[in-house]
Amino acid sequence: MVRDEQILRSLVFRVKMLSLQQVAGYWWKDAVRSTAFAKRRMDQLCEAKLLDRRRVMAHPMLELAAPVSTWTPGQPDPTPEEYEAVSYRLQARWEAGGPPEPTVVYLAHRRAVAQLGGAGGKLPPVGQETHDLHVSALYMRLIARGYAAGSRWLGEEILRPTRKQEKLPDAVLVDDDGKPNLIIEFGGRYKPERVRAFHEDARERQMRYELW
């Protein structure tokens, strides 16, 4: 099925994990009982050893309406005060959220990686689940324009072999010619120093970015 292949390719080439809600919200969005139908099919893919189902602890999802910070080559560098302001926004937004809660997520099984290529099949270190689900939410925003838009997204694990001893962003979007042209980063509780380091790496590469 086309839908199955899209889900599997998303998990081996684009993102590390997807929640049941994320899967249902895109691939079953027109179904009256979208979550139930999505769960049934995802369970079948797990039984076929193409997906792994795990229960992790993750904070409630933030509303990602717009990037916290953006930059384009040619613009001035942020001031120290601007680094402070971005850091404050990244940290303060967690204060209103609730504690971590059990969340069902799906990862690519090693059999899917063997069949399709790419990466995947590994849980992130404990404490990274919230981050990775928010990266997935940014990917889902992109494919909401149409699944083909996701082909512009190069995920962290796909980028890793090309970034020896270099900073590794959450994702990079490429243009029609396959040339990287936009860095995507989901910011956790970044201190000003980390915001600055992220900016300076992008400036050195002369690549525009969105820090969410």
Image (cartoon, helix red, strand yellow):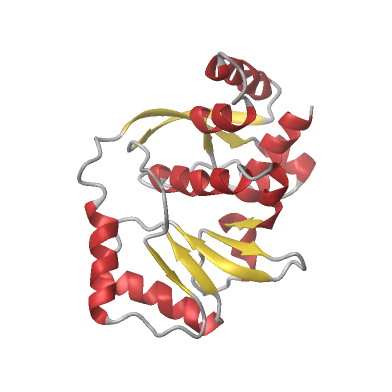
Q: Residue at x 27, y 74 (%)?
A: 82
**Vertical placement of 147 versus 67: above or below?**
above
Q: Nearer the viewer, residue 167 or 69?
A: 69
Q: Position of residue 119 (x, y in %)?
A: 65, 49
Q: Which quadrant of the figure contains the C terminus?
A: bottom left
Q: Can residue 16 be seen at all in this image of the molecule? A: no
Please state which of residues 95 and 59 is positioned toward the viewer in this rendering: 95
Residue 104 position within the rendered picture, expressed as x and y whole percent measured from the top left: 46, 27
Q: Residue at x 32, y 38 (%)?
A: 59
* Residue 121 or residue 138, whichever sits in front: 138
Residue 199 appears in the picture as rendered:
yes
Image position of 102 (left or right of 28) = left
- Residue 41 in the image: state x and y as whole percent: 65, 19
Q: Is residue 138 above or below residue 182?
A: above
Image location (x, y in percent) of residue 64: 41, 48
Q: How many marks?
A: 0
Q: Is residue 179 left or right of residue 55?
A: right
At a point 64% along the width and 56% down the height, the residue shown is 153
In the rendered view, would you say 15 is above or below 84? above
Locate the N terminus by quadrant: top right
